[in-house]
Amino acid sequence: MPPVPARLHLEALHVRLCRQLADLRPRRVADVMRVFLEVSSIASEEGLWSLQFAFDEDDGRIARIEARFVEPNGPDPLEGDLRGYEVHLLLPRVLPPRAQVEGDAPQGLAMMATDGSLVARFVRALADLGAYRTIEGLEALSAEAHLL
């Protein structure tokens, strides 16, 4: 059986991510992150290239989670744009004060931080990122997934 082309595999992951996000109620940031990482982990180890968390530069009300993938036998990932997907989380206008304990794994993600994979390293980095820890318990007003 021939391997599934990376383009189709990525689109299938995106569809799965969209479906799981649509079913998520309530849509807490930590739960969106868990679903995002679970779907991103489905790709083969050599396929997942990078993960990123950031805030929108305009007003900080949009958090963005991004996954990029490298195609097997594709172009050098350091020389071009990689395909992937991202989720935009629209946050409430007023953010509550941070109530998390330093050093604890983010809510619901501790089980993903147990090995040396990219996802585990990303989860451990989130545990140290105060900006993420501040919003992880919030309910997002929306969560939209986009192909890149």
Image: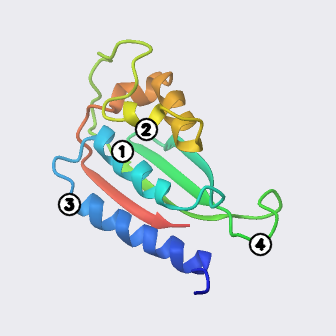
Labels 2 and 1: the sequence-earlier one: 1
Marks 2/1 in contact by CB < 8 Å: the verdict is yes
Residue depicted at 54% across the width and 29% down the height: 125
Distance between mark 1 and mark 3 Cα atoms: 13 Å
Q: Residue 58 carries which label?
A: none
Quadrant of residue 73 within the rendered picture = bottom right
Q: Is residue 15 above or below residue 55?
A: below
Task: Label 4: state its secondary structure.
Answer: loop
Label located before the other in sequence (1 or 3): 3
Residue 119: image location, x then y, percent: 52, 43
Three-letter residue code for mark 2: Met
Q: Earlier in the sequence, mark 4 or mark 3?
A: 3
> Which of these two is toward me, 104 or 115?
115
Q: What residue type is labelled 4?
A: Asn
First reached walking from the N terminus: tag 2 or tag 3: 3
* Residue type at the position of mark 1: Arg
Report, in whole angstroms, how far the alpha carbon at label 4 lies from the one at label 2: 28 Å
Whole-angstrom CA distance, mark 4 to mark 3, is: 35 Å
Q: Which residue corresponds to mark 3?
A: 23
Q: Name the residue under label 4.
A: 73
Callout 1–callout 3 Cβ contact below 8 Å:
no
Dot 2 alpha-carbon crowd within 10 angstroms: few under 14, some 14 to 19, many 20 or more: many
For residue 125, above or below residue 35:
above
Task: Name the residue carrying label 2.
Answer: 112
Q: Is 54 displayed left or right of 145 in the figure?
A: right
Quadrant location, the C terminus: bottom right
Name the residue beneath numbered marker 1: 34
Q: Is mark 2 on a helix, strand or loop?
A: helix
